[in-house]
Image (spheres, rainbow, N blue to C red):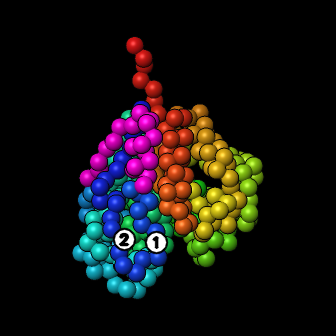
Amino acid sequence: MIHVVHHPAYVAPAPARSTYRWGKNGLIRDLLREGGGALTWHTPDPMPVRWLEATHDSEYVAEVLEARVPPSKTRRIGFPITPEVATRAAAVPGGTWLAAHLALEHGFAANTAGGSHHALHDTGAGYCIFNDLAVAATRLIEERTVARILIVDVDVHQGDGTAALTAGHPQIATYSIHADKNFPARKARSTLDVPLADGIGDDDYCATLETTLSPLLDGFAPDLILYQAGVDPFADDRLGRLSLSLAGLERRERLVARLVSDRGIPLASTVGGGYGDDALEIAHRHVAAIMTLGDALSYRSALV
Ligand SMILES: [Zn+2]
């Protein structure tokens, strides 16, 4: 049984003048529904304002929720903030937080949105509005749900916002493996950054991931992992610079699943980047990640 978090507001209508390709989250939901896997669906509450404000500037939170984000910020985000987009922005971190709780109970859970790792303290950036990873991690720690959280970010772009928003927090560590020459040009400092040269393929990627992530898992000993499972290291991704095959992406998820299950660490996944003209193909890649992780990590109830 795989626990999946989805909110109807994730499927917001595309705002005008958007360079972001909308509709991915609805396709992910549909593919999961049609896939015939044993899934349990959960609907999150929106993230309460006080917890958005625990990570983000309160004026920026108000600008988003009241759909009055100034053009200087919407240009950085990549689309205007309509009331529907604002509702979605509050629902997504609620989903990541709920997925974390479900993962603690069931070993694994997936949010069908999220991974908004470029969002910063007082502005969004790079198609990200609120940083669901940092917001959820901060709330989980401050509510004393867990003592240590590791955010593992395998999106092809560095998790710069997550690193900046959690920097210096002794109970939150960040790991980012990314294409060094990709966006953002100015990198933040994660607890551990693994910059990769352009064009790296499956074997080098997986070997580097294993040799860098394993010591961090052992050293930091997290109680929970929030996993940004961006699929943009795929060779044909429009915004990636790496050369992973579909089999390589699946290998990556199996590797991460093995590294955390060997250590008994629950994992909550979010989606992340994935860009190209065919939204359905990209949704398939996200669903493959969810199903691979879910198969490997969800606790099996005893058969009677
Ligand atoms: Zn990305």
Rendering quarter of residue 154: bottom right
From the viewer's perspective, is residue 150 above or below residue 109? below
How many numbered discs sit on the rendered protein? 2
Q: Position of residue 188 (x, y in %)?
A: 57, 70
In the rendered view of the protein, which quadrant contains the C terminus? top left
Is the residue 23 above or below the residue 203 in the image?
Answer: below
Numbered label attached to residue 14:
2
Question: Residue 72: x and y, percent?
Answer: 40, 86
The residue to which callout 1 is attached is: 20
Q: Say few, some or many: other residues with alpha carbon within 10 Å of mark 1 (under 14 / 14 to 19 / 20 or more).
A: some
Distance between the Cα atoms at labels 1 and 2?
Answer: 8 Å
Residue at image coords 52%, 51%: 284
Q: Residues within 10 Å of mark 2 (few under 14, many from 20)?
A: some
**Who is closer to the viewer here, 182 or 120?**
182
Quadrant in the picture for residue 121: bottom left
**In the displayed image of the protein, which residue is found farthest to the top?**
304
Measuring from the top left, give residue 76's x and y in whole percent: 46, 80
| Residue 193: x %, y % from top left | 63, 61
Residue visible at 38% across and 66% down in the picture: 130
Marks 1 & 2, CB-CB < 8 Å contact: yes
Q: Helix, strand, or loop for circle 2?
A: loop
The residue under the point 38% across, 56% down is: 26
Give the residues drawn in magenta, as a range: 27-45
Q: Is mark 1 on a helix, strand or loop?
A: loop
Name the residue nearer the viewer: 38 or 133: 38
Taking depth in this image into account, of 116 and 216 the one nearest to the observer is 116
> Who comes first in sequence, dot 1 or dot 2?
2
